[in-house]
Amino acid sequence: MSTMPTRALNPAQQQAIQHGSGPAMVLAGAGSGKTTVLTARVAWLLEHAVVQPANILLVTFTNKAAQEIKLRVRQQTTQQLPLCGTFHSVCAKLLRQSGGNIGISPSFTIYDTDDQLAALKQIYMAQHFDVQEYAPKAVHAVISRCKNELLTPAEYEQTATSHFQKFAAKVYALYVKKLQAAQALDFDDLLMRTVELLRKDQPTREHWQRQISHVLIDEYQDTNTAQYVLTKLLAAPQDNLFVVGDFSQSIYSWRGADYRNMLALKTDYPELKEYRLEQNYRSPQSILDAATAVIAKNTQHPILSLWSEKSSPDKIVSLSAESGESEAAYIIQSMREQLRIYPANELAVLYRTNAQSRLFEEALLRAGIPYHLVGGVKFYERKEIKDLLAYARVIVNPLDEVSQIRVQKLGKRRVVALEAARGELTKLSQAVPQEFLQRILKVTAYLGKYKPELEEDRTRLENIEELVAVASQFQSVTQFLENIALVQDKQLADGDPAGETNSVSLMSLHAAKGLEFAVVFLAGLEEELLPHSRSIFNLEELEEERRLCYVGMTRAKDRLFLSCARSRYQYGVRSNRMPSRFLADIDQDLLEKIEDGGVDSYGARRTISLSGQRTLVVDEEMIEDMLSGKISVDAFIDS
């Protein structure tokens, strides 16, 4: 959200909000005040175009954004917007009122994700399907994708070629019948059935088209096929459509979002008027230039040229660390410096995969710096980590009742396999923890719970990989498990971390969209991490990785730190890493390059500024040692 005052509209914003009739697309760059423009557009329609509030439909992607716009409109115009909400909430309202015309009860239940999976598991049980062959989650993902693409079970069955696809088509048909019998709709149904209602029921369609004279939609780059079709149905016949979006911030393709819907608008509405908001109110020009250099390599969509009146004397710090641990340690030291200037809630660490949070969580705990995870669960509290640790604890201590109960819930076959291998595993528990964990994974076939083709499951597999990497750094299983217990209980913290109200934010790049911080640490800028290994040989996916990097960089209001490691633990082995190609895209004059050489004999971090100036990052304990005479100043400098 922009920090620009509500009434201070620049010329480009003024042109956009005063758009006359017909379709319009506003390309709103990061930090360009799009929320202000949407609010001002509504106010202009109410005050100057004399449109009634009930004739305006404003759609956002989060309830928070809808509430904020409602509040701003009320503050500016004293009027309420009755049709303002997410796609799903607006569709639910339409279906409650008119869904009976296509056989939907007005008292229908909305199934959340857990309800949907429970329904699928009931189908599996009734039909004697094997959950080990095709996981319900994998089938659920297919059904969701079909509904977002407006494909019925019969239509999907016609396109199914593989055994899995044919199986999913069969389950899809059974799932639809089960929800109909329960008078229930899932989230995807809210969109799909509303499209069905408006297409099939002419009186209902014409009623809503008469009522809605203006349609405004936020974050249009995140729409899927169903939402695109809904847009056209609700905007007709006046076609007073006003969409706001940014191609460069389209980062949710894995859940059906398609930025090409913005390109399709130009085809479907030849008279479409385009406005560009390129003045940024968040970041200094140096950060915008660096971010633009990264995103400019994309060729599949338009790129905005962001500019700002804000400048900064500080260059973007680009750190090349010896290891992932050194990267985390340097970031913590830099945080200490920034915390003298900014409150903790103005600092954020961003990363590509959730598994990366573990290093930063442990480093922040040890440093006594309060933190919280945004949109995620702390590493050692994640289900897959707790499951694997429960297996390990049961072998080390058969009397651990809490772990025994958790293991039992993971399946009898796995428990039997674990007990059959107890002797072997007990011997391994006296050796290297890494081998011990890897053997547990093989004996229990635990990894079979997860399907690599599912985004959520890939994340869980990455977390397990990270736990194995942690284990490889300890000499014994007992020491490994003890360290985890201490970390979980915050016994390794140097201080007394406060709550989340004033704490450093840790989050994935996907979770960072829409947020802003004074200081941003973008970690793990390495090949196969950012860009991710899955995307390197696919142009579409590689361009999305660039957009992810761009989103991360443009979260920074004042300072930006980019970091990579020259080596990391991967699959329990330390492997060499290559810096991300995105770093090479940035004008090197914008960067202060620092090479971190690890920790010296005094506990200081050896860091060298590659611009020719040596930088030594020290902590308070080292300063006290110098002042007390424990460390010779000359020796300290020479080190």
Image (tube, helix red, strand yellow):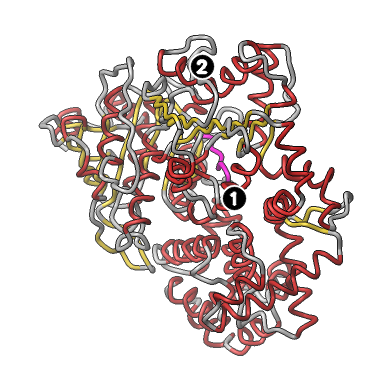
Residue 64 located left or right of residue 305: right
Residue 491 located left or right of residue 201: left
Dot 1: within a 10 Å radius of its alpha carbon, few (fewer than 14), some, or many (20 or more) residues? some
- The image quadrant that residue 422 belongs to is bottom right
* Residue at 73% across, 33% down: 210
In the picture as drawn, the residue positioned furthest to the left comes out as 612
User: Label 2's element?
Assistant: loop
Disc number for residue 377? 1
Alpha-carbon distance for marks 2 and 1?
Answer: 44 Å
Comes first in the chain, label 2 or label 1: 2
Disc number for residue 18? 2
Quarter containing the C terminus: top left
Q: Which residues are magenta?
A: 369-377
Q: Nearer the viewer, residue 33 or 475?
A: 33
* Residue at 52% across, 82% down: 162
Does 83 sit above or below residue 182? above
- The image quadrant that residue 231 belongs to is top right
Dot 2: within a 10 Å radius of its alpha carbon, few (fewer than 14), some, or many (20 or more) residues? some
Q: Position of residue 226 (x, y in %)?
A: 60, 52
* Residue at 88% across, 49% down: 106
Q: Position of residue 38 (x, y in %)?
A: 56, 24
* Magenta portion: prevailing SS class: loop
Residue 389 visible in rendering: yes
